[in-house]
Structure formats: C-alpha cells, structure tokens
Amino acid sequence: MADTCSQMLLGSGLTVLSHPLMYIKVLVQVGHEPLPPSLGRNLFGRQVYQLPGFFAYVKHIVKIDGKAGLFKGLAPRLCAGTIGTLVHSRVIQNYQKADKTEESGNSQKEDLSSLQQVVNETAREMVARSCATIVTHPFHVITLRCMVQFIGRETKYSGVFDSVVTIYKEEGILGFFVGLIPRLLGDVISLWLCNMLAHLINTYALDNSMSHVGEIKNCSQAVTGFFASMLTYPFILVSNLMAVNNCGLAGGLPPNAPAYPSWVDCWRTLSREGNMSRGNSLFFRKMPAGKMYAVDQKRFF
C-alpha cells in the first residue's frame, strides 16, 4: 500500500509538471496553429520555414489565458492518473497472490526459460495496463476536450462532474470510450515491442561478464521503449483525434477537422495527407511540404 501511495504522489507531481507539454501537444495534434511559420535555419544552416515550437506556444497561451491557462484539463488528468495507478497495482497484486497460492500447492517449482519469463511478465503487464486504460479512459476524454476548448474559446466542459453529465446526455455511455480501441492497440503493441526487443538485445547482444552490464540493460530498455513509442505514435494521435471529433467543439468540427465515421477512417485520412506524425515533435517543427497556411483559420491546408 505504501508503494502504491508513493507511486500516486510521484505520478501526480510528474503530471502537474508535464501538463503544459501535453496541452500544447494536443492542440498541435488537432491541427491548431495560431502562430504563422517564420523563416529560420536548420542544422545545416539552410534557410527554411519553421513552425513555432513549445516555448512560442506557451507565450501565446499565457498571453490569452494567463499562466493558469496552461493547466486546462489538469483535474481529470490527475483523476485518471490516480485511479489508473490503483487499478494497475491491484491487478498486479492479484497475480502475485495467485503465484503464492500456486507455489504453496506445488512442491516443485517449474523452471522457465528467460523468454518464457519475459512473455509471462509482459502478458501480466498488458492486462494490468489495459484494465487501467479502460477504467480511466472517460477521464482522458474529458481532459482532451477541456484542452481543445481553447481553439473555439468554449466553456462546455468546465469541470469533471459537469463534463460527465454533458457527455452522458449528448452521447450516452459510448461517449466516454471514443478513441479507446486505437489507444489500447498502441499501448499493447508498444509494450510487446519494447520488452521483446530489450530481451533480444540483453540476451544476444550483451555479455553478462561485461562491466556495468546492469546499467547497459537499463539503457537498452529505455532505448527500445523510445523506439516502440515512436512506432506506435499514430495510434495515440488517432485516439486523441477521435476523442474530440464531432463532440460539439470547434476544434473537432469542420472546417477545423473533418467528421470521421470511425478511427479507421481517421487513420486513412491522416495517412493520405501525410499527417501521421503531427504533434510528435514540439521543438524542431518544420513546415509541412506542399501545405499553405490559412491565417484566418489558423491551420494548414
């Protein structure tokens, strides 16, 4: 219980600190570009048109809504983080209890290969994460919609309870789970890619007799995690777009965004337009090739 409480406190602190970053990332993901591109230089010294980065976006939001405006949607996100930690911890604890019961019933413990151990641990982590994601997805939807209100200056989603009532009245129970499928797929694929790649590297590329092998294995886990998250980023993008699509907010309605019949249609549209990585980077943003910036609508066409 103490470990769970410390995880919740640490997670809440990191959530507060990283919230402005997520806020701006979401606005970029939905295609909102309030600041025009400017002429700058790339790493090779060549002049190129660049899009405003994270700090320019921060200044723009602070100018309009003040510093408190950087934390729109924080309350439901904190709820999601706390509840998700509790659900994840409870699922893992149930697995551990089942293991102890099985060990007490069997006098001989079965030896498992390293690959089988990784598969078992990954499968358990997948179940725990999936349960946490499903339970907390309604709060994730509310968080995204609170953020996207910045585009149309709406106040439709003003609090957690009021947002729950609004979504239930307008969309029913299913409204709380829009965008869930691509989010789950992205989490599951990323988890398996990360753990399997790390196992292959640690087993076949590293020698246990090497010095600092433990630190190297931890580094390989971090690198494979970053690689897996890059590959599965389109799932997160599609999930976030579906969560705000056609929900009554200007940021999720034409002309700012098309009305997608399904997440598959959203995926195909983004892929066709070359926007599968939109919002992936907030610091080195180049102007999309073949796009024109519309000043009045604050987006690219």
Image (cartoon, rainbow, N blue to C red):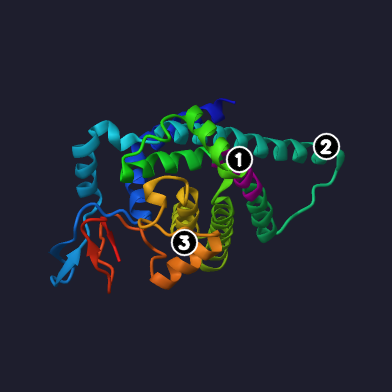
Q: What secondary structure prevails in the magenta region?
A: helix
SS label for mark 3: helix
Disc 1 crowd rating (10 Å Cα; few below 14, some 14-19, many 20+) is: few
Q: Residue at x 50, y 36 (%)?
A: 81
Q: Which residue is mark 3?
A: 234
Question: Disc 3 vs disc 2: which is toward the camera?
Answer: 3
Residue 104 marker: 2
Report how far apart the C-alphas of labels 3 and 2 lie in the structure.
45 Å
Q: Amino acid at mark 2?
A: Ser
Q: Secondary structure at mark 2?
A: helix
Disc ID at residue 172? 1
Q: CA distance from mark 1 to mark 2?
A: 47 Å
Residue 158 at x, y percent in the picture: 41, 31
Specify the amino acid type for callout 3.
Answer: Pro
For this view, does 212 lie left or right of residue 72? right
Q: Is residue 100 shown left or right of residue 248?
A: right
Image point (28%, 63%), residue name: 300
Q: Quadrant of the N terminus?
A: top right
Q: Is residue 107 above or below residue 6?
A: below
Q: Earlier in the sequence, mark 1 or mark 2?
A: 2
Q: Is residue 195 left or right of residue 24?
A: right
